[in-house]
Amino acid sequence: MDKATIRATIANRVAKEFKDGDLVNLGIGLPTEVANYVPEDIDVTFQSENGFIGMGPAPEAGQEINNLTNAGGLPVTIFKDAAFFDSAMSFAIIRGGHLDCTVLGALQVDAKGNLANWMIPGKKVPGMGGAMDLVTGAKKVIVAMEHTAKGDVKILSECNLPLTAVGVVDLIVTEMAVMKVTDKGLKLIEINPEFTVEEVQAVTGAQLIVEDDLIDMK
Amino acid sequence: MDKATIRATIANRVAKEFKDGDLVNLGIGLPTEVANYVPEDIDVTFQSENGFIGMGPAPEAGQEINNLTNAGGLPVTIFKDAAFFDSAMSFAIIRGGHLDCTVLGALQVDAKGNLANWMIPGKKVPGMGGAMDLVTGAKKVIVAMEHTAKGDVKILSECNLPLTAVGVVDLIVTEMAVMKVTDKGLKLIEINPEFTVEEVQAVTGAQLIVEDDLIDMK
Amino acid sequence: MKKISTVEQAIANLKDGMTLMVGGFLGVGAPELLIDAIIEKGIKDLTVICNDTSFPDKGVGRLVAHQLVKKVITSHIGTNVETGKQMHDGSLEVVLSPQGTIAEQIRAAGAGLGGVITPTGVGTVVEEGKETIELNGRKYLVELPLKADVAIIQANVSDHKGNLVYDLSARNFNPLMAMAADLVIVEANKIVESGQLDPNFVHTPHIFVDKIVEGGKNG
Amino acid sequence: MKKISTVEQAIANLKDGMTLMVGGFLGVGAPELLIDAIIEKGIKDLTVICNDTSFPDKGVGRLVAHQLVKKVITSHIGTNVETGKQMHDGSLEVVLSPQGTIAEQIRAAGAGLGGVITPTGVGTVVEEGKETIELNGRKYLVELPLKADVAIIQANVSDHKGNLVYDLSARNFNPLMAMAADLVIVEANKIVESGQLDPNFVHTPHIFVDKIVEGGKNG
């Protein structure tokens, strides 16, 4: 699979998790692309943690507004029923359980639902931004990422990078599979028919529990 | 002194405590009247704890606005630079140290600066409303009240009614005198020339420390 | 996600014994039509959270006067003789708490905080039975968040999606309660099409609102 | 109480070593003229509180790039290569904290709360060295309020008295910082007469504002 197909596969599958009326926060990078795949028959509102709901796609060239950017600093548009607020309200929404779903990337994620996505000691320390708040506060946490990082395993039995939060991840969506975090460990619930269970397991650092009625990735 | 003179004397004296630029909250009843005596050469902003700053006097009959009342539920007006907010912001202002002065009545006040003004057990339990927040948060707490309640002493060495807060009162203004709460106890700093120190002490339940340069009430 | 409904539909899921937040300050900014409907339906044994119990014939005070409230958490009851009467005869439990503390407790529930650390009430009866914490040499009370099953609030304008704008001092506790209940029902004086409110000046973002009814008594 | 002043007058009392809050989110809503003036005057050894350290050529990031900052409390430094460089060579102390926690810490200082009780950061390095509290069976961190000597913020419109209105996503941390500093300096794109702003739609009430300068770079 080429990069574009990988990203499209993941983004498309994540979008199927949303329900009508959901409030969703998408992380920067791949998760942002999920917005392009929301089914037309449901109404999903996107929040931007720098202070508004009702975020729309990027504007056409020349239509950018200086004071209207997403949390990554890129120009965006808004829908007509948008509302702006300050950072305290923005994080009250995020931390108060009002966010139905947050979609983020990960450096590592593990079978206990632990997530590491904000620093690599001695190498890269960008900071957590709103990530710790988002995964602690959202009703559903979806990790959307490539299954491996240039071959290195990212899905582990236990993260060894500094954590973003403990036991918060609900679902992991990669180009190869969809995995659910359960009390017993990672359950493989959907698989991309281009791969076998063995192939997925081979690049996964945690033992996968294969769902009895394993289905093709939606 | 008749009631009207008593109230005017107290209100007029309290108003002299304000400085240009002050934000002030006036309790209901007598304290409300203080607004009528603010010197014209200073700019004082009044806060109403139900959610705005820039409160003005009562409207003329027929000019009342349903949704514009003070914290006692009475119709008021606003000045042109008013601003409205919710109760969380209103009490952030009160509790966050942004209020320069609060003026309240008291059932009892004592030499340690303790205040009791919200209930009489078994008799009257109106509730504390915003009083506990106001006296805990304001930079300066002024008790404005008649010196006695129909002859009963209200200024004590120690309150025996349930407290509103501990050690918060800065100044007590009555129709007879102005008393400052100090580490050593109540200091009599101004006296209404219609009374003698002995007369004031006789209706005060705490030992008054008479200021060396005791002056007439301003 | 159609939120606009009749008053009857809006309160259809209210049940005896629920915890209910009611907006308003001495009745200003209270959802009178929703209160009418609750009285009419006789929903009782309510635990009510409100700033004050208003007057017997206004706002939340009417729920008290109709004896539908079994417990009230509030800062002031002095303007409603019914509250005092029922408190004394034991039919109504009254928990008095400082107004600013109630505001922060409601906000804390809405904002996902575990509690509120406040100096208000230290050394008074408000402290009784509560956890305290000392920070930087000062003693504080730990007040727990206040959450409700249902909040009934009043706004001046709502758009079809539920973005709200309040009017003057009728705002008070309404925006806070909108954040802190499982079901949030708004009574708006006026309902406008989406896009009619300026996104820069919305007081309550629509995501907090579940049901919208058109009001009339207020404003 | 004349608040409108020149940029020079506005920053006249800023001194080396002060704690400074700077509004903005990746530079959007940052007070660029005030930052210019601080750089020009060379006020240094600052402890800065900000959402992120922006870019080397934008907003608070410019204070870092000019090596005027000795410590920064922030949630994200990944977009400013200068922050990372100075952190690694030891000339800049960086305290990373979750964005929502910083927002609440600033608000707590402004609202007179003793701290913030939050689940964010539990079980991570953010927990290290902090007090924890267990409430209703859940563990929380106790995060202390964040206060500053000076806040420099950006608004779209200020009236002569200091009532403020922000524009779109330039609002972010500006209203919070206005509540939490001893001296609050606003850079407004536009200054209007008192009475020109609708009291029902003021974002920051004037009582928080000490100095107003007319801006220009933003909006």
Image (cartoon, coloured by chain):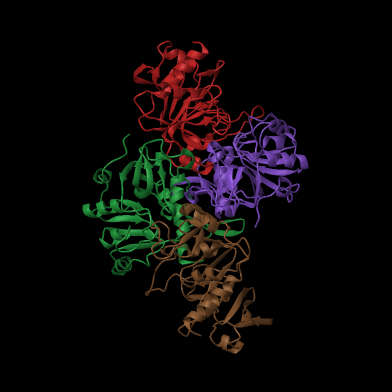
Chain colours: A red, B brown, C green, D purple
Q: Is residue B58 above or below residue A214?
A: below
In which quarter of the view is residue A63 placed? top right
Q: Residue furthest left?
A: C41
Whether residue B183 can be seen here: yes
In which quarter of the view is residue D64 placed? top right
Horizontal and vertical percent for residue D127? 57, 42
Near-viewer residue (D214 or D167): D214
Q: Is residue D212 above or below residue B214?
A: above
Q: Is residue A162 left or right of residue D6?
A: left
Quadrant containing the N terminus of chain D in the rendered view: bottom right
Horizontal and vertical percent for residue D59? 66, 36
Horizontal and vertical percent for residue C202? 45, 42
Taking the spot 38% from the left edge, 36% from the top edge, the residue there is C194
Taking the spot 52% from the left edge, 40% from the top edge, the residue there is D120
Whether residue A175 can be seen here: no
Quadrant containing the C terminus of chain D in the rendered view: top right
Horizontal and vertical percent for residue B101? 57, 65
Near-viewer residue (D4 or A94): D4
Taking the spot 43% from the left edge, 36% from the top edge, the residue there is A99
Q: How many marks?
A: 0
Q: Is residue C115 above or below residue D126?
A: below
Taking the spot 72% from the left edge, 33% from the top edge, the residue there is D65
